[in-house]
């Protein structure tokens, strides 16, 4: 059963973590930016696309003073995820670091960023905030680009998964419902390269104690976590290899 949530406002999805996304009723593909509040610092995750920027910005400022944002995590370089980073740089108006993989930073730089990069692959795959709170980065290569990774917040046991666990559906709810796995499979069958590559990363994620999966697309998953991981672990994907002209 889907839980009804007022998505016109920022939604607290775990202690100090907010969904600040936008429900586009005309699209079957939703983007989910997030904010982590931690003492005097804040972390903005996958801030999103240009068309949704005003809506996302309004939700962000409703939960945090912009100068508190010290880090912006960009799980990959696609515009639906990080095209608004330069806009957020302007309104934050203080030094920030863009947390990403080296391979992604080469491409993200083309958006005209002013921030320094914090390369997760050169920082022991972790980031420790001033409070001592640790964000761990798990490498998920080729899902769906070579430098892909996900972010695990040790404090709340929330896993921010970028494209992984995303779904295609016009019947969107903030929290995954009864048929979410089918939409999730449809997305991964076409966007992920192979069963072997997907399964390898799923085996890594099975070792984590996860209370909430927060993907960049689709819905939040806070129940039956292992069921969703195993659904992807066993999924045949890379369908475009079999299409013919």
Image (spheres, grey):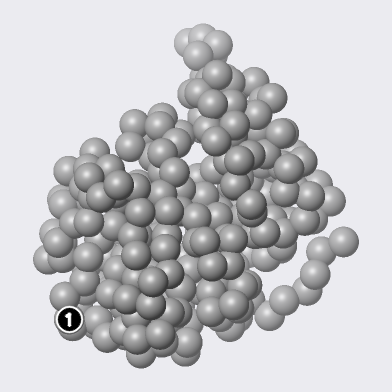
Q: Nearer the viewer, residue 201 or 124?
A: 124
Judge whether 201 appears above or below 76 on screen.
Answer: above
Q: Is residue 25 left or right of residue 77?
A: right
Which type of secondary structure does the marked residue at label 1 adopt? loop
Q: Residue at x 50, y 45 (%)?
A: 163
* Residue occupying the point 59% across, 26% down: 199
Q: Vertical placement of 127 versus 3: above or below?
A: above
Location of residue 147 by image quarter: top left
User: Residue at 65% across / 29% down in the picture?
Assistant: 233
Q: To which quarter of the image does residue 111 belong?
A: bottom left
Quarter of the image where one finds residue 159: bottom right
- Nearest the camera: 131 or 89? 131
Q: Which residue is mark 1?
A: 94
Q: Quadrant of the N terminus?
A: bottom right
Q: Position of residue 9 (x, y in %)?
A: 58, 83
Image position, residue 80 (x, y; %): 40, 54
């Amino acid at each position: 059963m889907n839980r009804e949530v007022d998505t016109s406002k920022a939604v607290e999805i775990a202690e100090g973590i907010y969904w600040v996304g936008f429900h586009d009723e005309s699209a079957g593909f939703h983007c989910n930016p997030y904010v982590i509040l931690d003492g005097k610092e804040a972390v903005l995750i996958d801030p999103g696309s240009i068309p949704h920027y005003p809506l996302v910005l309004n939700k962000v400022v409703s939960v945090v003073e912009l100068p508190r944002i010290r880090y912006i995590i960009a799980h990959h370089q696609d515009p639906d995820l990080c095209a608004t980073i330069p806009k957020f740089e302007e309104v934050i108006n203080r030094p920030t670091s863009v947390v990403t993989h080296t391979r992604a930073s080469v491409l993200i730089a083309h958006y005209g960023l002013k921030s320094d990069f914090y390369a997760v692959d050169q920082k022991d795959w972790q980031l420790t905030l001033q409070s001592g709170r640790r964000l761990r980065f798990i490498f998920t290569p080729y899902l769906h680009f070579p430098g892909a990774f996900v972010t695990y917040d040790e404090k709340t046991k929330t896993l921010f998964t970028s494209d992984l666990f995303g779904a295609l559906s016009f019947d969107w709810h903030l929290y995954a419902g009864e048929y979410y796995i089918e939409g999730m499979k449809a997305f991964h069958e076409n966007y992920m390269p192979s069963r072997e590559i997907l399964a390898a990363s799923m085996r890594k994620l099975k070792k984590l104690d996860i209370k909430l999966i927060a993907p960049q697309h689709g819905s939040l998953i806070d129940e039956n976590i292992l069921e969703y991981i195993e659904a992807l672990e066993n999924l045949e994907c890379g369908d475009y290899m079999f299409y013919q002209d």
